[in-house]
Amino acid sequence: MTEQQDRAREDVVIEAISDQDAGEVLTVQRAAFVSEAAIYGSVDMPPLTQTLPELEAELRSESGFVARIDGRLVGAIRFVERDDLLLIGRIAIAPDMQGEGIGRMLLQAAEDASSAPVAELFTGSLSEANLRLYRACGYEEHERVPDGDGTEQVFLRKRLEA
């Protein structure tokens, strides 16, 4: 870990997501997923097309955390528990903060907040950085679902109970 990553981790405050965070979350989400759009050659993906009212409704029905540094929202994670599964939704990290350990911190916070025995998340098959992060955090590939364009959605799971 670099000195910058250590410093970033010390400055990061993880707190429960709230309705008041919606605008900032949407801004970070859009910025974070621009690189995904470039990988897949399409901006027609839900993280980029989601509207503020849609996100506000999502925040009312799901749990989540935000990461802040000096008051600035630099990351967010959303999740819900269903049928003994912690379903992790969008993880979005501000582009200038990616690779600083914030995604790991948010994943850990979601896992710690859950009573589910298993966590599941997914990403696209071309999203190599995401796959590396999830595998490094203990997630293992569970299933691949073809998208019809030559790519796949990769579902990964992690046991949370010993």
Image (cartoon, rainbow, N blue to C red):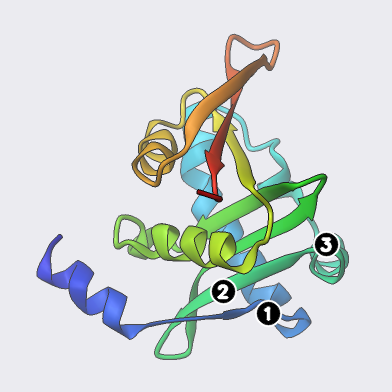
Q: CA distance from mark 1 to mark 3?
A: 12 Å
Label 2 amino acid?
A: Val
| Residue at 55% in and 29% down | 124
Label 3 amino acid?
A: Glu
Residue labelled with disc 1: 21
| Residue at 53% in and 40% down | 158
Label 1 amino acid?
A: Asp
Q: CA distance from mark 2 to mark 3?
A: 15 Å
Residue sitting farthest toward the front: 162
For residue 76, say whether it is visible.
no
Question: With respect to residue 51, does 85 lie above or below?
Answer: above
For marks 1 and 3, the one nearer the N-term is 1
Disc ID at residue 76: none
| 64 horizontally vs 133: left or right | right
| Residue at 51% in and 23% down | 125
Residue labelled with disc 2: 66
Q: Are marks 2 and 1 in contact (CB under 8 Å)?
A: yes
- Measured from the top left, where is residue 130 in percent x and y? 43, 40
Crowding at label 3, few (<14), some or many (≥20) Cα neighbours within 10 Å?
some
